[in-house]
Image (spheres, helix red, strand yellow):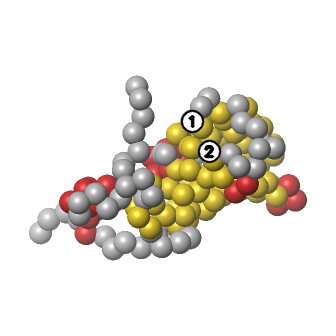
Amino acid sequence: MSDARFEDGDEAPLRLIAQDAEGLAVFAALLQDAVFPITEMSLVRQKRRFALMLNRFRWEYLEAAQRAGGKFERVQSLLVFEDVLAVRSQGIDRDDKDTILSLLDITFTPGEDGTGLVTLILAGDGAIGLQVEALDATLRDVTRPYLAPSGKVPAHDV
């Protein structure tokens, strides 16, 4: 008998919950290099909910895609944060509706009594800060995977 391997799982859509910094780090790894139009983020103040519709690179299938001759995939995913008290941004022009943003990382800075600051770090020195009453996030794939338009693995200059 051998241990289960990630590759043995089926290719079901992701449906994840993060309620602490460790869970959010998993989201950050899965969402690195996700892209989204600026028009695909919204705050519903009455429900204290912030949502993003992203096109994420499927890092979890990188090795399988390389074995298949470079058939790299993306999938549309919905990232939702609940209990959002305030949203701030820097380095992005929210009035430019043609802007495409690229997500590089997500961090959580805890505050008092479970509160904290979620920071979505964007390419080009942009950032979105979410002041939350408690960390409560979900990540869910909402479409079938599709071939990455670039045909390449995202890369960064160091």
Q: Position of residue 84 (x, y in %)?
A: 76, 49
Q: Please tell me which residue is depicted at 63% across the width and 59% down the height of the picture.
A: 53
> Residue placed farthest to the left in the image?
1
Residue 14 appears anywhere in the view: yes
- Look at mark 1 in the image and give the residue it sits on: 123
Check if mark 1's residue and mark 2's residue have beta carbons within 8 Å.
yes
Residue sitting nearer the eye, 17 or 44: 44
Q: Position of residue 10 (x, y in %)?
A: 33, 74
Q: Is residue 144 left or right of residue 106?
A: left
Name which quarter of the figure residue 89 lies in: top right
Q: Please tell me which residue is depicted at 66% across the width and 35% down the height of the picture.
A: 127
- Look at mark 2 in the image and give the residue it sits on: 101
Q: Is residue 147 above or below residue 83?
A: below
10 Å neighbourhood of mark 2: few (<14), some, or many (≥20)? many
Q: Name the amino acid type tagged 2.
A: Leu
10 Å neighbourhood of mark 1: few (<14), some, or many (≥20)? some
Q: Name the amino acid type tagged 1.
A: Ala
Q: Tag 2, which secondary structure?
A: strand
Q: Which mark is residue 109?
A: none
Residue 27 appears anywhere in the view: no
Mark 1–mark 2 Cα distance, whole angstroms, equals 7 Å
Name which quarter of the figure residue 120 lies in: top right
Q: Tag 1, which secondary structure?
A: loop
Q: Position of residue 139 (x, y in %)?
A: 56, 60
Name which quarter of the figure residue 154 lies in: top left
Q: Is residue 2 above or below residue 59?
A: below
Q: Is residue 24 left or right of residue 117?
A: left
Quadrant of the image containing the C terminus: top left
